[in-house]
Image (tube, helix red, strand yellow):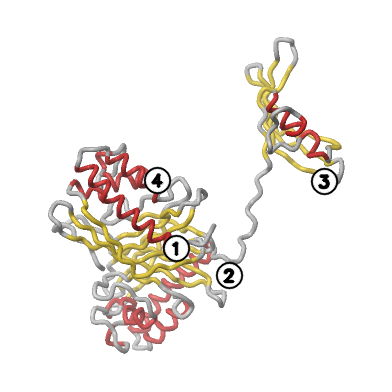
Amino acid sequence: GADAMSYFVGKSNVAEGYDEDSGFAINGGKGWASVKYMNHQVEVVNGVGIAMGNYDFTCATTGAVSRVEYTFNYKKCADGKVRIFLHPSSVPFKPAAPAEPIDGLLPVTEAEVRQVQEKWSAAIAKISAVHKAGGDFIGAAGEAAGELYGYGHGNVLFKPTKCAEHQFRPTGADAMSYFVGKSNVDQGYEEDAGFAINAGKGWANVKYMNHKVEIVNGVGIAMGNYDFTCATTGDKVRVEYTFGYKRCEDGKVRIFLHHSSVPFKTAGAAPTVDLAAAPVTKAEVLAVQSSWASAIKAISAVHKDGGDYVAAAANAAAELYAYGHGNVLFKPTKCAEVQFRPTGEAAMSYFVGCNAVANGISEDAGFAINAGKGWADCVYDNHQVELQGPVAIAMGNYVFTDATDGSKVKVEYTFGYRKNADGKLRIFLHHSS
């Protein structure tokens, strides 16, 4: 009763009142002129009355009306009187205000992300068709790149499919070599056969299949697969992707992040890595990367010593990944059956192995323990760290050293980092290949 009195009449009017209480019953001193109940429903269950609805409070000073949601429970006491024994009230939910412009530019919407994807697909088919007809496919590709990619408007993080000699393409010239082929541009790269023309065979169409589209502080992130249909043979090729989209100064939404990779396949020889709120700082990103690398080594060491490596992995995941704080887009290395891991449970299966967790995924041998062999070291090599206000994107390679035989494995990565409500920077995007 003392707690309730503090709430109703204010902290200064009772002994040991709570600082947050200004006196609801007196409206912080302004008073209430009237209160009007509007029951949504009254239900009597086993002699208990339950009422749910809204009530409107009219300020005695200003006349303003405040609406509050309620659920009351009533029961009859020993003296025969009906009294309240449950009383939760809440301010009605209000949709978030329209997103504020970021650096004067409106946030990207999911609809705009999908529009850019449609334009990208159409551009690939058009470039192939122009090439087949003997037209200026290079001009068509240049026009599409200028329309769809952020070259000339800011940094672009581009890691194309099947590029080993020049994995990353930070300039428009680099990208053009990849899309139209080494022989069709000045100083083209030897490994580039012309993806947009499928090395001469062309693409008939491209179909995006988003695993998820996430809008984070005005930036669009999409992860999924796209299927390319060969214009010559009709064969379909599936490729994994992570794209990032942002609005440029001319108001157009363009791609600033593009990581593509061929899905891992279990058949054949032993698998190898296919080389195919507040502003985040670079120092914070590097600190999380250092913690991630240390966690991998620590989990392996605990496993080797026969300790509780599952708990060690769970603690690291909670510290480093944003599960429980928002959506996480996670496409791990060498996952073919279950490519995407949107839940903490699915991620744990990947890191510690299917046999170490309930309902583990059968393809998971335990990456954090290297399928039992352990990792002695993990070294990040950032190609680039892009800071987008409260979001940061990092692309590059990391090298893992086998704790058993000392061999090294290089893996490509794109990570996205953002700060959570508790102020900690965590991973919300992780694409490895």
Q: Is residue 98 above or below residue 135?
A: above
Quadrant location, the N terminus: top right
Q: Earlier in the sequence, mark 2 or mark 3?
A: 3
Q: Distance between the Cα atoms at labels 3 and 4? A: 45 Å
Q: Earlier in the sequence, mark 4 or mark 1?
A: 4
Residue on which the image places disc 1: 392
Q: Give how far across and how far down residue 55 sits, in percent.
A: 75, 36
Residue on which the image places disc 3: 64
- Mark 1 surroundings within 10 Å by alpha-carbon count, few (fewer than 14), some (14 through 19), many (20 or more): many
One can see residue 238 in this view: no
Residue on which the image places disc 4: 318
Q: Nearer the viewer, residue 235 or 1?
A: 1
Question: Which amino acid is tagged 3?
Answer: Ala
Q: Earlier in the sequence, mark 1 or mark 2?
A: 2
Q: Residue at x 68, y 27 (%)?
A: 3
Residue on which the image places disc 2: 103
